[in-house]
């Protein structure tokens, strides 16, 4: 038998309908009223059972949807949170890189402005020097050559000589100084122009890098926003699913209590029928009740993942398709054929020596109460009645009414189910 505490895929069951269906079915099997002897009464009861079964099916479908949603969210949320963390880290790095690139561009542009300003100053200085040299050249042209030889030859007296020599030396010094400044200015200008060219190239490169960093930052921002939206969406979906599940808290609790009562009832039936058994004694060997079916769930405690309610899974589940024949594990007498809200369509067979077997969730029965069956006889067919999320057989072995691990009769150790 499968029920919710084993995983999120086990139903949270909106069980008022399930309880109704179980009560109606049990009342028909165990306590048929006197008025049900007429065909009309029997028809009405069958209609009630059919309606209750339909309502149970609708409720179970809703529960399966909620459980599936929770399972999907729980599976996706850790990866989404990790993705968001990584996206935020990338965004932080991209923001830092963007700021650094912007600062580098700003610094390079500032340096370029400084170099450009120096170029303009040097060009102005060069122009002034060239103008000074031109003035000297014009003066030389106007006043004629002032070479030292001409000064000596044309001097009329020592004073004239001294004056002419002083003028010549002054022109020479001025010309030499201007030429030196001109050369220096030209060299400085060439150097500054080269630096300005390199700086412009560097500014262009840094701007391109900054544009790329900006694009990376925008992409990282979009990725972080998308990751955050995904996490928010998953959390919202989880909250909605949990809210829907919260509505079923008391219902689920009642169903757990009902399941305990059903198990106690089954224990009493198995104990009572074993005492009254008069058929052949059990040989100790059993046949696997669904040929080729594997085990999908074993015995043990089941804990509700949200509310923490505890329930006992008293047997093993075998996965198989709806309609697959279910075989008697050993020869014996059919002690019970009933519909139980948790177990669905259920058959109990007693085999003697205090041993009985239980087969639950059948789609339909193949035997009636009191029938004698041989090992391997078809006693019903696999289904998904009762609290079940899919077609399977729930199989139990009981000794003096107490549930034991069925695998003890198929090579395992015979241990009582400890729950």
Image: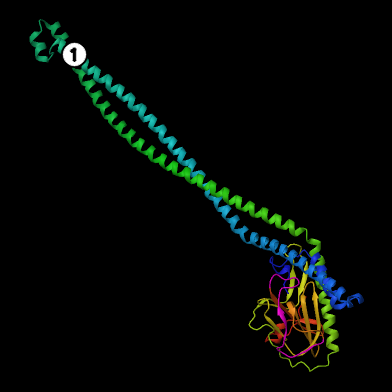
Q: Quadrant of residue 363?
A: bottom right
**For the magenta stretch, what is the residue range?**
370-390
Q: Which SS type dominates the magenta stretch?
A: loop
> Could you say whether the residue bearing mark 1 is in a helix, strand or loop?
helix
Q: In this image, 25 relative to 172: left or right?
A: right
Report which residue position mark 1 lands on.
Answer: 138
Q: Nearer the viewer, residue 399 or 150?
A: 399
Outermost residue on the right side: it is 34
Q: Nearer the viewer, residue 256 or 337?
A: 337
Residue found 86% across the figure and 76% down from its top: 39
Q: In this image, 259 relative to 177: left or right?
A: right
Q: Quadrant of residue 320?
A: bottom right
Residue 252 at x, y = what percent?
Answer: 79, 65
Image: 324 above or below 153:
below
Q: Quadrant of the C terminus?
A: bottom right
Image: 9 above or below 199:
below
Residue 348 at x, y = what percent?
Answer: 79, 83
- Count of marks overlaid on the render: 1
How dense is the environment of label 1, judged by Cα within 10 Å: few (below 14), some, or many (20 and up)?
few
Residue found 71% across the figure and 91% down from its top: 285
Residue 396 at x, y = what percent?
Answer: 75, 81
Structure colour scheme: rainbow
Residue 12 seen in the current view: no
Q: In this image, 154 relative to 226: left or right?
A: left
Residue found 83% across the figure and 73% down from its top: 43
Magenta span contains residue 38: no
Residue 236 seen in the current view: yes
Residue 383 at x, y = what percent?
Answer: 71, 75
Q: In this image, 17 relative to 199: left or right?
A: right
Q: Nearer the viewer, residue 342 or 157?
A: 342
Magenta span contains residue 381: yes
């Amino acid at each position: 038998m499968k029920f919710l505490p084993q995983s999120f895929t086990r139903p949270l069951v909106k069980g008022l309908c399930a309880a109704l269906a179980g009560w109606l079915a049990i009342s028909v099997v165990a306590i048929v009223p006197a008025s049900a002897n007429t065909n009309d009464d029997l028809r009405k009861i069958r209609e009630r059972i059919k309606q209750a079964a339909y309502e149970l099916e609708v409720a179970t479908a809703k529960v399966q949807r909620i459980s599936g949603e929770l399972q999907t969210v729980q599976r996706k949320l850790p990866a989404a949170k990790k993705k968001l963390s990584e996206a935020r880290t990338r965004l932080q790095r991209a923001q830092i890189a963007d700021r650094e690139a912007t600062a580098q561009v700003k610094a390079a542009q500032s340096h370029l402005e400084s170099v450009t300003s120096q170029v303009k100053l040097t060009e102005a200085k060069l122009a002034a020097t060239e103008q000074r040299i031109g003035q000297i050249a014009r003066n030389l042209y106007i006043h004629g050559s002032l070479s030292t030889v001409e000064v000596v030859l044309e001097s009329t007296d020592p004073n004239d000589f001294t004056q002419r020599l002083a003028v010549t030396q002054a022109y020479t010094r001025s010309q030499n100084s201007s030429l030196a400044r001109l050369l220096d200015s030209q060299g400085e200008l060439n150097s500054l122009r080269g630096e300005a060219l390199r700086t412009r190239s560097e500014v262009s490169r840094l701007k391109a890098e900054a544009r790329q960093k900006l694009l990376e930052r925008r992409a990282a921002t979009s990725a972080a926003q998308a990751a955050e939206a995904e996490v928010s969406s998953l959390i919202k979906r989880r909250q909605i699913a949990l809210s829907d599940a919260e509505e079923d808290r008391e219902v689920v609790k009642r169903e757990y209590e009902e399941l305990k009562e059903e198990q106690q009832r089954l224990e009493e039936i198995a104990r009572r029928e074993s005492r009254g058994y008069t058929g052949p004694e059990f040989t100790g060997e059993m046949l696997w009740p669904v040929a080729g079916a594997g085990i999908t769930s074993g015995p043990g405690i089941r804990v509700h993942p949200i509310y923490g309610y505890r329930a006992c899974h008293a047997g093993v589940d075998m996965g198989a398709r709806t309609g697959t024949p279910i075989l008697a594990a050993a020869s014996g007498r059919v002690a019970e054929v009933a519909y139980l809200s948790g177990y669905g369509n259920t058959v109990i067979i007693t085999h003697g020596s205090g041993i009985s077997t239980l087969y639950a969730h059948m789609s339909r029965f193949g035997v009636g109460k009191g029938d004698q069956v041989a090992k391997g006889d078809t006693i019903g067919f696999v289904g998904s009645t009762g609290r079940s999320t899919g077609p399977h057989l729930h199989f139990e072995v009981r000794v003096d009414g107490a549930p034991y691990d069925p695998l003890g009769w198929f090579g395992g150790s015979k241990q009582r189910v400890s729950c």
